[in-house]
Image (cartoon, helix red, strand yellow):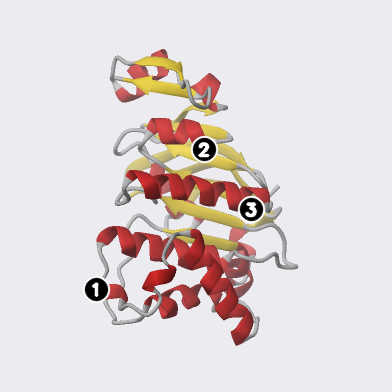
Amino acid sequence: MTLKIHNVTAKISSAISLVDIEVEVEAGSVTVVIGPNGAGKTSLLRAICSDLPFSEGVITLNDKVISQWDAQSKATLLAILPQRSSLEFPFTVEEVVTMGRIPHSTSNSQNRDIVNKALALVDCNHLIARSFINLSGGEKQRVQLARVAAQVWDAVDAGDRCLILDEPTASLDLAHQEMVVRMFEFFAAQGVAILVVLHDLNLAAKCASQILVLKDGRSAALGKPETVLTEEMLKDVFSISAKVISNPVNGKPMVVT
């Protein structure tokens, strides 16, 4: 077991943002979190990152309470890409992606090799010498994806690795959204556990091993895409009337509005 969220309840000020959340993110799987705005998706990721204290429950990484990991060891296992990553210094793309290697004790030559491979994974090799602050929004997002990819690129003795991403496809075009799906497949094949927040339900259906649906801070559904993405759930959680059909390309559920 890589990441386990067990009966977690959390508050922001006096308002409850998460209630009794239970989900396990296993090595080699992709767990997608969906839900309307304000449902608690980012709050869940903040709780995992220890940015949001929770009043009940426990979160473990490789069977160890996440708060008990020392910062460096945890950073070799757990890479997090928040919804917004601000970086205003004129670092080159290579320098930004190399930041993902800071927790590791690997050599400079090993780090350069990993950085090049991570950039290739997100179609950014041609940007390696560019200034990060001069990139477009989509290019910046892909470079940040390369940074977290570099952070968990290789296996470590401390345990299974985990990748957490909050809306990683928000500023990407269709081709690069597909690139992110391939990135998930690449890391899942290596045994990395992936937890990702997505708004695109059809993209979620395509890449998820399981989907967690949040509504008002509570779990409204959890399971395989075929069991979770139903017309009844869409009406109850998202307040939309939509059809769910079989995708003719991959056989996954497809939401048609």
- Is residue 180 visible in this depiction of the protein? yes
> Can you tell which mark lies on residue 207?
2
Q: Mark 2 or mark 3, which is nearer to you?
A: 2
Question: Which residue is found at the position 57% from the left and 37% from the top?
Answer: 22
* Residue identifier under label 1: 134
In which image quadrant can residue 213 be found?
A: top left
Percent from the top left, x then y, of residue 107? 64, 85
Q: The residue under label 3 is which amino acid type? A: Val
Q: The residue under label 2 is which amino acid type? A: Cys
Dot placed on the residue nearer the N-terminal end, 1 or 2: 1
Within-10-Å neighbours for mark 2: few <14, some 14–19, many 20+: many
Dot placed on the residue nearer the N-terminal end, 2 or 3: 3
- The secondary element bearing badge 1 is classed as helix
- The secondary element bearing badge 3 is classed as loop
Comparing 132 with 81, the one in front is 132
- Is residue 50 visible in this depiction of the protein? no
Percent from the top left, x then y, of residue 160? 69, 57
Residue 197 vs 204, above or below: the answer is: below
> Can you tell which mark lies on residue 87?
none
Question: Which residue is found at the position 45% from the left and 50% from the top?
Answer: 179
Percent from the top left, x then y, of residue 125? 44, 69
Quadrant (top left, top right, bottom left, bottom right) of the C terminus? top left
Residue 64 vs 117, above or below: the answer is: above
Give the Cα distance between marks 3 and 1: 32 Å
* Residue identifier under label 3: 192
